[in-house]
């Protein structure tokens, strides 16, 4: 009997090790934990602190998410060029540039240190102005301002985490760092929820959430030292850092401009909505918007985990190999969209039985947000694949989408509030973003289309079925 128990324990241990050693799973766990840690205390905030405090926190979370816009997509570019450097390949087509890891790491240190300062200053100034109106509606503004102060001080910590995770990802060390990241953020969310339950204070909540993150930073710093980060950033090569900057800057500003306009428009819609809608309606849409942000991170994990492999295959001129990797990642991403958004859709009719049912958007608005997410992730998957060529077109694709979104938001939000924001996001994708990335990838890699996209049929049908069932449960869309 003891031998059988030992075998069972051994099998369980192997399964745990297999899961924690999977880069896609741990990326998903990390991204879910990061977003979930912010959203986990929200129901308790509604219960113990009221809708205004919950709306303030959701607005703060939205602003935290917008901080990443200032990186202009640089982390993904750094992951790619680090992977190519380790493979010994040229950084872009038609270029003889071969960068060293040391030059890239020195540039990373400069970029992330500068971003830390800029993000903290913007959060302390523009961010403060953005939350001021909601704070003024609170019965306890001192507690909210103190919590916001902690959020501002935590900005450099979040940048430090991103820089070290980017470095490790670029070196192919993904699973363990992301597992630790997920555990830390999960604990942070649990500590935050417990603090709200015990104290009813937003300040106590934000302080409690920081403790695991500080420990995670210390652990990541140690792991990066073992990966020779400290050695690499102190190696000096004449002209190497300038070459690295030229290689990074060209795709980064293009990608970043598009990200600022497109993602900034989606997240900024919540801030604009707060100027026209009630705190309750604003909180409901911001909760759904943060849910979409969580899903975007989760659905991005198959692509993020595949980026290193695609770039390596591309550097070795293994075309069919990176096409296959991209197709698998694209299908996985859309399956996640279908099942998770469908599960939430099925839950929405049930929320009407709860006293906090107005804390979330209607099934109609959620459907519009979901269709937009499906279209965006499909196009983004092709765009990520095409970008391994270092031909970055994000700036005009995302930029055009963002401009259209902003224009539609200004027209629709004052008239339709939350539904106007959701429709603006969906309609802005259709003119350009929904189809151009597919055309670019298919033509450049000589892929057979629509055969190359047969993997999207299953997720589309599954998602549609779940939403139809949710509509029937709700008695039809209202």
Image (cartoon, rainbow, N blue to C red):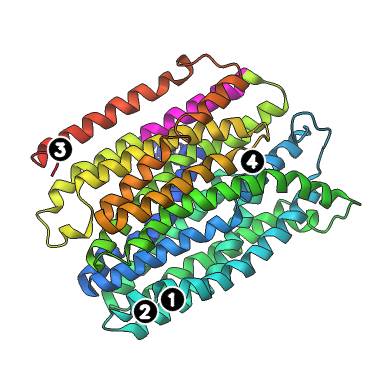
Q: Is residue 8 visible?
A: no
According to the picture, the residue beneath numbered tag 3 turns out to be 471
The quadrant holding residue 314 is top right
Depth check: give the residue in front, 344 or 214. Answer: 344
According to the picture, the residue beneath numbered tag 4 turns out to be 172
Single out the mark in the foreground, 4 or 2. Answer: 2
Q: Which residues are magenta?
A: 320-336
Relative height, residue 153 to residue 245 (above, below): below
Q: CA distance from mark 3 to mark 4?
A: 44 Å
Depth check: give the residue in front, 116 or 87. Answer: 116
Q: Is residue 323 magenta?
A: yes
Percent coordinates x, y for residue 41 in the rendering: 31, 65
According to the picture, the residue beneath numbered tag 1 turns out to be 148
Q: CA distance from mark 1 to mark 2?
A: 6 Å
Q: Residue at x 80, y 50 (%)?
A: 103
Percent coordinates x, y for residue 111 in the rendering: 69, 59
Relative height, residue 70 to residue 346 (above, below): below
Q: Is residue 11 magenta?
A: no
């Amino acid at each position: 009997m003891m031998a059988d128990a030992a075998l069972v324990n051994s099998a369980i241990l192997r399964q745990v090790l297999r899961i924690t050693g999977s880069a896609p799973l741990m990326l998903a766990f990390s991204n879910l934990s990061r977003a979930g840690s912010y959203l986990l205390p929200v129901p308790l905030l509604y219960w113990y602190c009221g809708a205004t405090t919950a709306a303030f926190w959701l607005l703060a979370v939205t602003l935290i998410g917008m901080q990443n816009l200032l990186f202009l997509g640089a982390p993904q570019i750094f992951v790619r060029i680090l992977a190519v450097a380790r493979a010994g390949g040229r950084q872009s087509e038609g270029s003889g540039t071969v960068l060293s890891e040391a030059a890239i790491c020195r540039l990373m240190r400069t970029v992330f240190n500068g971003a830390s300062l800029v993000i903290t200053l913007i959060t302390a100034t523009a961010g403060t102005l953005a939350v001021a109106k909601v704070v003024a509606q609170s019965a306890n503004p001192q507690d909210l301002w103190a919590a916001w102060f902690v959020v501002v001080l935590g900005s450099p910590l979040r940048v430090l985490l991103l820089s070290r995770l980017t470095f490790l990802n670029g070196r192919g060390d993904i699973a363990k760092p992301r597992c630790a990241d997920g555990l830390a953020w999960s604990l942070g969310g649990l500590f935050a929820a417990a603090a709200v339950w015990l104290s009813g204070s937003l300040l106590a909540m934000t302080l409690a959430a920081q403790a695991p993150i500080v420990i995670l930073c210390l652990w990541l710093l140690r792991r990066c030292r073992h990966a020779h980060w400290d050695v690499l950033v102190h190696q000096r090569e004449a002209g190497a850092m300038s070459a690295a900057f030229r290689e990074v800057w060209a795709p980064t500003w293009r990608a970043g401009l598009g990200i600022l306009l497109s993602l900034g428009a989606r997240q900024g819609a919540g801030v604009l909505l707060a100027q026209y809608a009630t705190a309750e309606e604003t909180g409901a849409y911001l909760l759904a918007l943060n849910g979409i942000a969580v899903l975007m991170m989760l659905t991005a994990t198959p692509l993020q985990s595949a980026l290193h492999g695609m770039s390596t295959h591309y550097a070795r001129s293994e075309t069919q190999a990176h096409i296959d990797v991209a197709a698998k990642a694209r299908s996985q991403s859309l399956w996640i969209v279908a099942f998770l958004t469908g599960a939430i859709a099925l839950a929405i009719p049930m929320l009407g039985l709860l006293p906090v049912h107005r804390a979330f958007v209607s099934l109609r608005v959620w459907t519009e947000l979901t269709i937009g997410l499906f279209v965006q992730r499909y196009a983004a998957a092709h765009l990520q694949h095409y970008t391994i060529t270092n031909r970055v077109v994000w700036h005009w694709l995302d930029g055009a989408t963002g401009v259209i979104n902003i224009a539609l938001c200004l027209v629709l939000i004052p008239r339709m509030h939350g539904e106007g924001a959701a429709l603006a996001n969906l309609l802005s994708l259709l003119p350009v973003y929904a189809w151009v990335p597919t055309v670019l990838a298919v033509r450049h890699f000589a892929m057979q289309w629509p055969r190359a996209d047969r993997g999207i049929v299953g997720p589309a049908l599954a998602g549609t079925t779940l939403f139809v069932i949710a509509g029937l449960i709700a008695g039809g869309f209202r």
